[in-house]
Amino acid sequence: MLQLQYIKDHTQEIIERLQIKNVQNVEERIQEILALDEQRRDLQKRADAVKAEQNAIAKEIGMLFKQGKQDEANEKKARTADLKAEEKTLTDQQVAVENDLNAKLISLPNAPHITVPRGKTEADNVVVGEFGSKPELGEDALPHWDLCSKYDIVDFELGNKVTGAGFPFYKGKGARLQRALINFFLDEASKAGFREIMAPLLVNEASGLGTGQLPDKEGQMYAVPLDGYYMIPTAEVPITNIYRGEIIKAEEMPLKNCGYTECFRREAGSYGKDVRGLNRLHEFSKVEIVVIEHPDRSYDMLEEMKKHVGGLLDKLGLPYHILKLCGGDISFTSAMTFDFEVWSAAQKRWLEVSSVSNFETFQANRMKLRFKDTDGKTKLCHTLNGSALALPRIVAAILENNQTPDGIVMPEVLRPYLGFDKID
């Protein structure tokens, strides 16, 4: 959530930054927020004046009774009753205005960094780096869903039988490949200074609100309404919420955590050839890196996280490129995001495997996550996270890019985790 005071102090800047995200009617929305804030403060001022008058009259009543002026005291008491009723009316009005103001602030996206490219769709994203060589496969190369069937390593039909589409079974060497990737990603994160966390897969409403998944405008979260829980779409949600409501010391930052979880997304509205096989699932495994950082250093940390993710792909031998997302493709909560996409040789297309984002104070403001700076002032932290990495499309690219007539050759870095060199 954007800080109200920042909106008031930098109104035109916020409008211009939100226009990069193509926010509709942004000027009107900002002016509504400012008007509600003015109304709230006016009601508070009037309520304070009424309360002050009540206090003054209460002192007068005491003095009048002491002086034996009972009739005058009773007249004052009648006035006090009127003031109490007026105060309640003003307080009720203030609560209603505050609720409306908060709802409008909650519905306002994060303002993107001023360097975020303008654009409306993913076609306007900017490639900022390309790494590795695309493998050349023969005409008989198979897409990963056929390879999964051929070697009996991922069973989509069984998943559909037991649960539904988008919930596959991983079998034999397919299951071991999943486990190897998870352990490899966690080990690499540990080497990079991230503390491993095993987090719950269900969170409460406050946690979803804190990191911006709620209100769920796109209907992507699985809910457990009987208990008021939500299944996590990413480990970002529980791990970031560890610090909700906390005040940390400046010298403790950066706070670097990582965690493997299953992730659950309804993927509402997704259909077509691009969702086949492992390309888009309702449940998938992912290792997430989460950082709480000082505002002065958060963009340096974003670069560090990008290098970490790129290093994982380099070690796996997967060709990839990095995209700087434009305003129309960046998420509701993000101030800046870089996507990593690997080349799928059989599908001949790029597959997104990671997003690395800086949310600046947006999540911290919702969570009341603060730090005490060296000047003694309490300020909001910056939060960042990134996929390091999401498994399904990594598996798809490994299978497709490394297929040979004799089987699928495994990346050398994974072999100590796997116990085998190829799937055949």
Image (cartoon, rainbow, N blue to C red):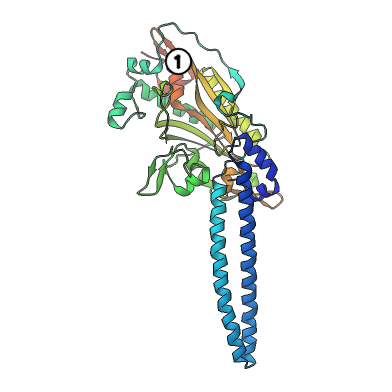
Dot 1: element: loop
Coordinates of residue 166 in the picture (x, y in percent): 37, 29
In front here: 399 or 167?
Answer: 167
Q: Answer with left or right where residue 128 lies relative to residue 236.
A: right
Instruction: Please tell me how many numbered marks the rendered image carries.
Output: 1
Residue drawn at point x = 54 percent, y = 69 percent: 88
Q: Residue at x 54, y 47 (%)?
A: 106
In which quadrant will I find the C terminus? top left
Question: x, y (%) of residue 339?
Answer: 55, 27
Which corner quadrant of the image does residue 419 belong to? Answer: top left
Q: Position of residue 2 (x, y in %)?
A: 61, 45
Q: Position of residue 90 (x, y in %)?
A: 57, 66
| Residue in the picture at 61% in, 63% down | 43
Amino acid type of disc 1?
Gln
Relative depth, front residue between 57 and 191: 57
Q: Is residue 312 visible?
A: no
Q: Residue lying farthest bottom?
A: 68
Q: Mark 1, residues whose alpha carbon is within 10 Å: few (<14), some, or many (≥20)?
A: some
Identify the residue at the far right of this view. 375
The answer to whether residue 128 of the structure is visible from this angle is yes
Query: Is 364 above or below relative to 64?
Result: above
Q: Is residue 335 left or right of residue 268?
A: right
As rendered, which of 26 and 338 lies closer to the eye? Answer: 26
Q: Which residue is mark 1?
A: 347
Q: Is residue 307 above or below residue 254?
A: above
